[in-house]
Amino acid sequence: MNISTMRAGLPVAMLFAAVFLAATAQAATLQGGSFTIRSGEQAKFPIASAGAPSDMHAQCTLSDVAGSASLIFDGENYIAMSDLAVGETVTLTRGETREYRLSGVVDAPAGGAYIAFNFTGAAAAMCFPGMACDGAEDAAASVTVSCKPVAN
């Protein structure tokens, strides 16, 4: 086989390899649901993985906020590839709704992967000595967290 034939065949071989890898890529699946949580509680969504590093795509909505609320995004065996990194704080105000489209990699060969939102209470008011702080928003009694799996 001469070199020009090998060069011509290389792109075709790379295309077949890419198609094979895409066909064998496995997806992790989020167990969707909806939770209304109070301060100190957690909305936890388990992720079923394929036993190897897998892509996971989900959409989460934070809603029904009747005051000020802070939530911390959490995850185990989940590597974020989109907005909302593990440990990031989300602050919501009265009546606000936020939607997040999550993409990440799940690496949990023995299971145990999840994402979660922890309701940590009201956002701290920025109030300095001598300031009137009576305009600070009251803490929300609860927040609704809904997540569902979505296609890439």
Image (tube, rainbow, N blue to C red):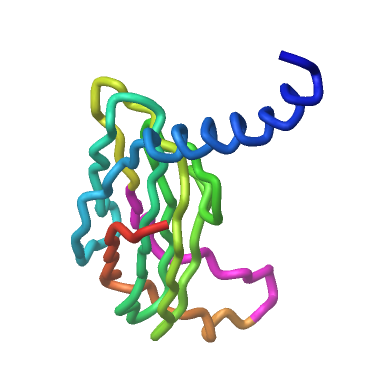
Is 141 in front, or is 87?
87
Determine the residue positioned at 33% across, 48% down.
116
Task: Give the left or right position of residue 134, taking residue 63 as reference.
Answer: right
Which part of the image, by quadrant, shows the C terminus? bottom left
Task: Give the left or right position of residue 109, taking residue 10 as reference.
Answer: left
Where residue 4 appears, as percent x and y from the top left, is 80, 25
Q: In the image, is residue 12 part of the stretch drawn in magenta?
A: no
Is 74 in front, or is 114?
114
Image height of 14 relative to 97, above or below: above
Where residue 6 appears, as percent x and y from the top left, is 72, 22
Which part of the image, by quadrant, shows the N terminus? top right
Determine the residue positioned at 39% across, 53% down.
57
Image height of 29 relative to 34, above or below: above
Is 27 in front, or is 68?
27
Task: Give the left or right position of residue 107, taking residue 79 as reference.
Answer: left
Q: Quadrant of residue 149?
A: bottom left
Where residue 67 appears, as percent x and y from the top left, is 38, 79
Determine the residue positioned at 48% across, 43% down.
86
- In this rendering, the count of numbered labels is 0
**Over which residues does the magenta segment extend?**
116-131
Determine the residue positioned at 34% across, 37% down.
26
Q: Chief secondary structure of the magenta span?
A: loop
Where residue 22 appears, as percent x and y from the top left, is 45, 39
